[in-house]
Image (cartoon, rainbow, N blue to C red):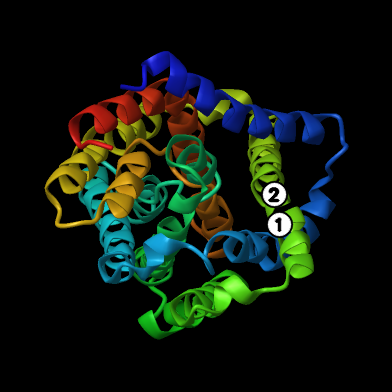
Amino acid sequence: MTSYGQILLLVIPVFALMGLGVLARRINWLTEEADASLLKLVVNLLYPCLILDHVPANAALQVPANLAWAPLVGFGTMALGIGVCYYAGRLLGFTVGTGLRTFAFTAGIYNYSYVTIPLMTAIFGQDSLGVLFVHNVGAEAAIFTVGVLVLAGESWSAGWRRLVNAPVVTLVIAVALNLTGLGTHIPGVLLTVIHSLAVCAIPMGLVLCGATVAEHLLGRPADLFEARTSLGAVALRLGLLPVVFLVLAKYGPFPADLRHVVIVQAGMPAAFLPLVLVKYYGGHQLTAVRVVLATVAASILLLPWWLQTGLAWAGR
């Protein structure tokens, strides 16, 4: 069985890259003005290349159960998290107008990509990423429908339209290449270019995440902790919800590849995407920052423990 120390060593480099993003913002190597263009580069070029690097020839995606269950699990776990955090937020004393919607939205959305991908690769190998990417389509569908509905009351149809983006379109093409067998016929020169761009996606994304957090961390740090928000988010995101995920992984009718995804997602901190969406929809930004920072800090120690527990109990 993988020990806590071994898993901690896998987790530390992920957060170290985020720390470099904080440092780069602090010494003005990565300016706030550069964020938008670099984010577009990651989302529209590097991340699609990461998908094309791992999906077209991935044998796990030829298992019908993986294609059927993965997006449903992604949607269900994300929607469940938002719902649980909404009602828990009411019990904690949040109300609409004082951060309830933002708390539910931010605490309910786990980090399904930038932190998950390097850990999936390290523990289960490169081939595990294909099922993860399909799972993430369902997760994003929940964010832009259920999540945005909770956060801002936007219509379901507007949320679904946001799913027409470069990563999702690339994934559809990549799965089609996989199922038709054409993925094995991509020219080697093109694969080399794709791979060269793919390996940049996660490091660049994590550095950008660190820079995004830095603008809050380096501003008024005393405001970034508030017991109800910070501890409540940790209790839900890294206490209650991981138990639900591991029960799902152990007893759900899923292939091993998807079970591995759920195990790794169980102990994830809150995602960084809500910071952008909360700002866009006029939510309570300080609440979102408190949730993200508290769960990220706590996950440095708790994520390895949940991974170790999940691997031992729900199985490899």
Query: What amino acid type is highlighted by mark number 1?
Result: His
Asked whether the residues under the numbered discs 1 and 2 touch, taking CB atoms below 8 Å apart as contact, a structural biologist would say: yes
Decide which of 170, 211 is in the foreground and name it.
170
Q: Position of residue 27 (x, y in %)?
A: 86, 29
Q: Which residue is mark 1?
A: 195
Q: Residue at x 35, y 35 (%)?
A: 267
Q: Residues within 10 Å of mark 1 (few under 14, many from 20)?
A: some
Does any portion of residue 92 appear in the rendered image? no
The label nearer to you, 1 versus 2, is 1
Q: Position of residue 136 (x, y in %)?
A: 43, 61
Mark 1 secondary-structure assignment: helix
Would residue 193 appear left or right of 203 to someone viewing this image? right
Q: Residue 199's mark?
A: 2
In this rendering, the count of numbered labels is 2
The quadrant of the image that shows the C terminus is: top left
Q: CA distance from mark 1 to mark 2?
A: 6 Å
Q: Residue at x 30, y 47 (%)?
A: 262
Q: Residue at x 78, y 62 (%)?
A: 193
Query: What amino acid type is highlighted by mark number 2?
Result: Val
Which image quadrant for residue 59? Answer: bottom left
Which image quadrant for residue 303? Answer: top left
Looking at the picture, does residue 57 appear above or below residue 265? below
Which image quadrant for residue 216? Answer: top right
Does any portion of residue 25 appear in the rendered image? yes
Mark 2 secondary-structure assignment: helix
